[in-house]
Amino acid sequence: METSATSGPHPFPVRRDLAVRAAAGQRLLNDDRPLVALLDLDAVRETAQALHTAFAEAAAPGQPVLHAFAVKAGSLVPLLRLLNGMGIGCEVASPGELALARAAGVPGDHIVLDSPAKTVTELREALALGVALNVDNTQELDRLDTLLGPGPTDVRVGLRVNPQLGAGSIGAMSTATDTSKFGFALRDAGAREHVLRAYRDRPWLTRLHCHVGSQGMPLAQMAAGVRATYELAEEINTAAQRAHGRRQVETLDLGGGLPVNFASDEVTPTFRDYARLLRAEVPGLFDGRYGLVTEFGRSLTAKAGLVLARVEYTKTSGGRPIAITHAGAQIAVRTVFAPESWPIRVTAYDPAGRPRTGEPVRQDVAGPCCFAGDLVARDRPLPPLAAGDLAALLDTGAYYASTPFGYNSLPRPAVYGYTLTGGDANGDPGGTVSFTPLRRAQTLEEVVAESGGDC
Ligand SMILES: *Cc1c(COP(=O)(O)O)cnc(C)c1O
């Protein structure tokens, strides 16, 4: 125990193997629960700390920086609570996500609302709670004019802009294309003047927001989006200075979208890489004149999570070995439906949770859903899986278990957080894993109820 303080904790992949071993030993998986998701809470804390540190290193002394976790990446109240405890707020995009943030105790001034389809009710609630609003379009701005009446004072509202820089490697994740549905397009004819006029006419617009995409965006393109946003803010502020003798845009919301490496355990790029790039490309961002907001989702939790599924059967078809597991489209929607864009690593463990080490054989890892494409890995070299083994879907701590798909009325699995006590990188190879529920498994009664059983 003493040595762990000096030698440091196990690196994350070692902790992951210990967690799988403990999950098997503590029978977290059984006939009724053949699928669970696990989240390394220390890894989440370390990642959150790395985010704080990266921007604190880049920012001017005392410059306000709010990191708001994109709730859609990990919509679990205890996770939001943990992050809130580390000073990380929430980026929300629906009434449900706002309710989750509030249930986690996140204060209104640490919440940012970004939905492109906010109803009047949502706008009212956000204003009443002191939640920051990023306005998506002209009609939404008209609504706010009506809601706010003349001369509102302490609201936190800005426009979301689209610098129209083009797509990254995944079209569906690219929000800064010419025809993206998000934000005020800046390069359309007359659009920049329209945005400048909107700020001139509304002194209460004090923020500016941009999120150019999620996963598959090159860092340079993300930085170009931030630079375009910064330059627009400077232009608005120069005009306001001339007209009223004061600056207008006080806060720049840089969005999220730092890509995650799904190919290995290496964390790349890091928050520090990105903050340093921003500092080099847009130095004015960090001279202390603006408050900053970030909205990272995937990069905060993806690598801390895994999905663990029991192999129910194995078979061959057309000579192809196939492992039929309990993890498919219901928990890995994007990987199943867009496998080229969302490949994930799958590793094999024996029924006791020890890594399988056999000679790799090309095989399919299939899910339980009743359609042929329900595969999480195709023709993948893996130690041969056997019935009763465990298949682990790695780097699935964001947008997997917390973003289920209701296909086949499969009950949503439990999500457990885990922490490790004892054990260290150099000496003690062991350690004790404790699990804490982040979400209960859905019961069949709940499946029936949400399927109209009460109608
Ligand atoms: C999805 C989203 C994010 C988070 O994206 P990640 O790729 O998970 O970091 C941030 N801001 C907005 C507006 C989003 O839609």
Image: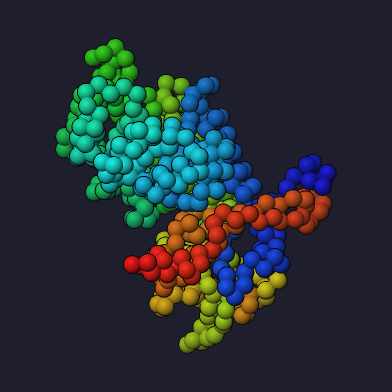
Q: Position of residue 284 (x, y in %)?
A: 42, 25
Residue name at image x 70 percent, y 60 percent: 18
- Locate the C terminus and report the quarter of the image it occupies: bottom left
Residue at the bottom extreme of this rendering: 318
Whether 116 is drawn above or below 228: the answer is: below
Residue at the top extreme of this rendering: 245
Residue at the front extreme of this rendering: 454
Q: Position of residue 16 (x, y in %)?
A: 65, 58
Residue name at image x 21 percent, y 23 percent: 150
Q: Position of residue 390 (x, y in %)?
A: 62, 71
Q: Position of residue 365 (x, y in %)?
A: 52, 74
Q: Is residue 243 visible?
A: yes
Q: Which sits in the foreground, 79 or 147?
A: 147
Whether 408 is drawn above or below 56: the answer is: below
407 left or right of 140 in image? right
**Number of residue marks:** 0
Q: Which sits in the foreground, 63 or 166?
A: 63
Whether 61 is drawn above or below 183: the answer is: above
Whether 144 is drawn above or below 218: the answer is: above
Residue name at image x 31 percent, y 42 percent: 122
Q: Which sits in the foreground, 75 or 313?
A: 75
